[in-house]
Amino acid sequence: LPIRASSYQHELVQTAKSIATPGRGILAIDESNATCGKRLASIGLDNTEVNRQAYRQLLLTTPGLGEYISGAILFEETLYQSTTDGKKFVDCLRDQNIVPGIKVDKGLVPLPGSNNESWCQGLDGLASRSAEYYKQGARFAKWRTVVSIPCGPSALAVKEAAWGLARYAAISQDNGLVPIVEPEILLDGDHSIERTLEVAEKVWSEVFFYLAENNVMFEGILLKPSMVTPGAEHKEKASPETIAKYTLTLLRRRVPPAVPGIMFLSGGQSEVEATLNLNAMNQSPNPWHVSFSYARALQNTVLKTWKGHPENVEAAQKSLLVRAKANSLAQLGRYSA
Ligand code: 13P
């Protein structure tokens, strides 16, 4: 029997295309309350809802953000919040032509039977949660699972990561949300860049195998890969040109051109490194829009500038625009440090 396609098919393609537009990328501010607490603690603030709201308001009301940012990934709490003047955050985004997105995974837990690896929770009830998020204005989703190179990775952990992403992607599309597919290959370890490439090829081949088995429409997804780099503790650092060469090799070997956009995570790279690496990848035409979906590499300076003081909000917003513009130029291959 034919498989029923999502009734949102055309809308999904449009949503993905509007996120993957030249010179724009994604602002990831979907830190869970626990992770947001760590960021706030770094500037001496308590992890309260008031402080989380104030920080997200600063980010989401930055004037001119929509020129460089096409989508913003939110945590569930933020999706339902408003500015202190009572304007819904989702409306602030829409007014800047930024698509609201939502983190839908429920985080990582130990994977029994593996080599100390983890798996990602959140499939139970995902369809009804996704339908609710759509009603609230979200049009894309994110599910982040991780693969650890020093822990193996075991065949079991890779298969579980790929299968979970594929089930999530199918459920998201069925509910009108463009799924961002994010198997983060962690930077930790002292392995070489060749080893990262080998693991990434394995991970992405399984991800696309299961995406196809789950009848996911490739024109209506976005990817959020890690760049192919040596492990963080490897003896040598790689240049942006080398990282671009290995990363583009991976993508050309594993990612069909039907996929509209590749939105990299920053994964602990510094702000400038993340921008230089993206710029290096856009020195010649690619079959997909190659862009950013950074959290830390867009927010580090913003946090340090803000420090929780209302009088610093404007300066902090300016520092967000500096990073957003730099990455916008990098998306176009026109950034120089
Ligand atoms: P970083 O860019 O800080 O690695 O965050 C990526 C991410 O998955 C957040 O959505």
Image (cartoon, helix red, strand yellow):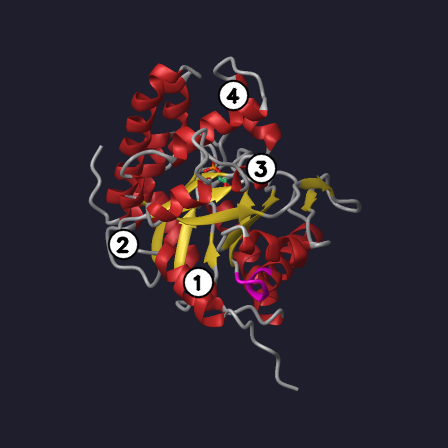
Q: Earlier in the sequence, mark 1 or mark 2?
A: 2
Instruction: Name the residue rendered at 27%, 31% in the picture.
Output: 322
Q: Which amino acid, by three-letter code, is at mark 2?
A: Pro
Q: Earlier in the sequence, mark 4 or mark 3?
A: 4
Q: Which residue is mark 4?
A: 40
Q: Residues within 10 Å of mark 2 (few under 14, many from 20)?
A: some
Element under disc 4: helix
How far apart in space, not on screen, are marks 4 and 2 (Cα)? 32 Å
Dominant SS type (magenta): helix
Rendered image: mark on residue 253: 1
Residue 266 found in image quarter: top left
Q: Earlier in the sequence, mark 3 or mark 1?
A: 3
Element under disc 1: helix
How far apart in space, not on screen, are marks 3 and 1 (Cα)? 38 Å
Q: Which residue is mark 3?
A: 77
Extent of the magenta region: 172-176
Mark 1 or 4: the one toward you: 4
Q: Position of residue 44 (x, y in %)?
A: 51, 13
Mark 3 or 1: the one toward you: 3
Asked if the stretch drawn in magenta spans residue 206, the answer is: no
Q: Which residue is mark 2?
A: 22
Q: Is residue 9 above or below residue 196?
A: below
